[in-house]
Amino acid sequence: MTTLFDWQAERDSALETVERNAGEEFKARAMAFALDWMAGKGIVSGEDITDACKAAGIVPHTDRAFGPVYLALARQGAIVRDGYAIRRRGHGAPAPAWRLAYADSSADTEQAHAALALAAKLP
């Protein structure tokens, strides 16, 4: 019998597979770039971040590899969901919108990087 929370386990398993295939170097580069790129932009869509990363040469084997990047940044407290954006791809379905967890200034981007570095050192 399936339970209400089976979708979470299935999501996590799929994200782990995509993340493993993309590699740690991709994830680290994408996370650092996303924080820098988001500074001063306010609320942005995941598609905007993905497109900016790809334009900067941070290109994974599939765009799905960006999901674990956003999830890791959110779990580490560097970014937060802030409403929803209408997707350009995906038939206009709503998708989470993101912003830095701190106010948009260069000092606060440094705080986000520091929080990310601290979280990386935690067990």
Image (cartoon, rainbow, N blue to C red):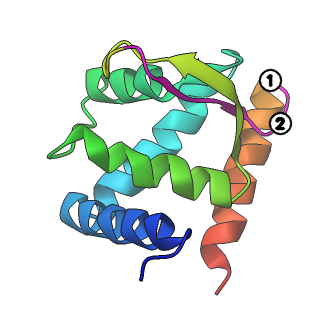
**Is the C-beta separation of discs 1 and 2 under 8 Å?**
yes
**Label 1 sits on what residue type?**
Ser
Considering depth in this image, is 102 or 16 the residue closer to the camera? 16
Quadrant location, the N terminus = bottom left
Q: Is residue 86 left or right of residue 67?
A: right
Position of residue 33 measured from the top left corner of the image (x, y, whole percent): 47, 36
The relative height of residue 119 versus residue 54 in the rendered view (above or below) is: below
Q: Position of residue 51 (x, y in %)?
A: 34, 21
Identify residue for label 1. Answer: 105
Q: Magenta residues, as a range?
A: 92-103
Q: Is residue 81 magenta?
A: no
Q: Which mark is residue 23?
A: none
Magenta-drawn stretch contains 93:
yes
Q: What residue is disc 2 on?
A: 102
Quarter of the image holding residue 64? top left
Quadrant of residue 40 within the rendered picture: top right
Residue sitting at the far left: 61
From the top left corner, tell me how far across and down residue 105 is, in percent. Answer: 80, 23
At x 71% / y 17%, what residue is drawn? 42
In this view, 79 is above or below 54: below
Measured as percent of width and height from the top left, residue 43 is found at 68, 19
Q: Looking at the image, is 18 positioned above or below residue 111? A: below
- For badge 2, the amino acid type reads Tyr
**Marks 1, 2: nearer the viewer:** 2
> Tag count in the figure?
2
Could you tell me which quadrant the C terminus lies in? Answer: bottom right
SS state under label 1: loop
Q: Mark 1 to mark 2: distance in Å? A: 8 Å
Q: Nearer the viewer, residue 93 or 80?
A: 93
Residue at image x 74%, y 54%?
77
Judged from the image, the secondary structure of the residue bearing numbered disc 2 is: loop
Which residue lies at the image location 42% right of the left edge and 68% below the top edge?
12
